[in-house]
Amino acid sequence: MSTVSPVGPANGYRRIATEEAFVPPELHRMYRELVASGSVDDPGFNSLIGYYLGHPSERARNVSERLQDIGERRVADMDSAGIDMQILSLTSPGVQVLKRDAAVAMARLANDQVAEAVRRYPKRFAALAAVAPQNPPEAAKELERAVTKLGLKGVIINSHTLGEYLDDPKFSPIFEAATALKVPVYLHPNTPPKKMIEPFLESGLDGALYGFAVETGLHALRLIVKGVFDRYPDLTVILGHLGEALPFWLFRLDYMHRGTVSSGRYDFLKPLKKKVSDYLRDNFYYTTSGMASPPAITFTQSVIGMDRVMYAMDYPYQYVHDEVRVQDALALSAADKKAFFQTTAERVFKV
Ligand code: 1DF
Ligand code: MN
């Protein structure tokens, strides 16, 4: 965790960091019980969350402590990194490994708690709602409550829910609610599910190092090819980590999807109204969480559009002051730089 000299104010823009994680102490304690009892049937959860809860390393302790603070300590970290505002979201896997009713209750608790932090620091924090996909009608109700009563700005889904993906029509109440409320769905990574994780765990590649991107990119593509955006053309999905590499794949996705659908290989793969790349340009926004690489950012802006790529840090998992400076120094016009750090986020999250 870098604690070098403060970054200082930006030149003509506010820095809004759009993928910034927290955990309520109550959920932190519940994770501890779940890992200890081995009752969650998800090896990725047990391995990664077990690491953060119990490992003696500096990194594990630092992240665990900082995740639980949505007050003074976090604001001090933001001050020294030059972050004007964080869009807070419940850390992965959120409530998505809990039993149904516990998940519903914990999502409410997390939303109430983060809404209180936003009330205390209205200029520094805005937040996304957590919901329990385990109970789709309740998830839709909680999203509506969080947006209309608590003032939250969208919803975070930490990818699969114990191996289930949102293209399953049973999850449609969540998309109905998000589109009716006109709020975005942030599709955040999770470790690959049990049926996919073995080769990742064998090589230590399950987490943010690579497994996250594979799992979440897959999830986004499932939404597209299973027709979710033809059913919900106004749905907005946000991907972190520069789109989990999907912008690099546009050409081949279009070519191979066209060929697969037209040859009729899978009965369930129906023709779409648009090309795969069209959905990735029209329905998605992208953040730079964890990807402070100027050529990668510039590439994504060039193939997706300047107005769809936003700054994110990935606090507290990747809290590095120099990464802010690197993105301040991107070769962009003053207007594009302001869109990147500030105005696109203001538009997408209505902050
Ligand atoms: C890590 C990173 C873990 C992120 C996360 O959830 C997470 C990590 C447990 O580095 O192990 O959400 N992240 O978004 O950067
Ligand atoms: Mn993240």
Image (spheres, rainbow, N blue to C red):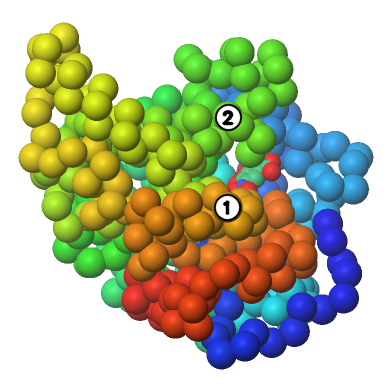
Residue identified by numbered label 1: 295
Disc 2 is placed on an element classified as helix
Q: Position of residue 119 (x, y in %)?
A: 52, 84
Q: Name above or below for residue 346 compared with residue 114.
A: below
Q: Amino acid at mark 2?
A: Gly
Mark nearer the viewer, 2 or 1 = 1
Q: Quadrant of residue 143?
A: bottom left
Q: Name above or below for residue 114 compared with residue 105.
A: below
Farthest residue toward the top?
265
| Residue 121 visible in image | no
Q: Quadrant of ligand 1?
A: top right
Q: Which image quarter is the C terminus in?
A: bottom left
Q: Amino acid at mark 1?
A: Pro
Q: Which image quarter is the N terminus in?
A: bottom right
Q: Position of residue 3 (x, y in %)?
A: 87, 67
Residue at horizontal 24 percent and vertical 55 percent from the top:
282
Q: Nearer the viewer, residue 306 or 79?
A: 306
Q: Quadrant of residue 325?
A: bottom right
Residue identified by numbered label 2: 211
Residues at marks 2 and 1, CA–CA distance in whole angstroms: 22 Å
Disc 1 is placed on an element classified as helix
Mark 2 and mark 1 lie on one chain; the one further toward the N terminus is 2
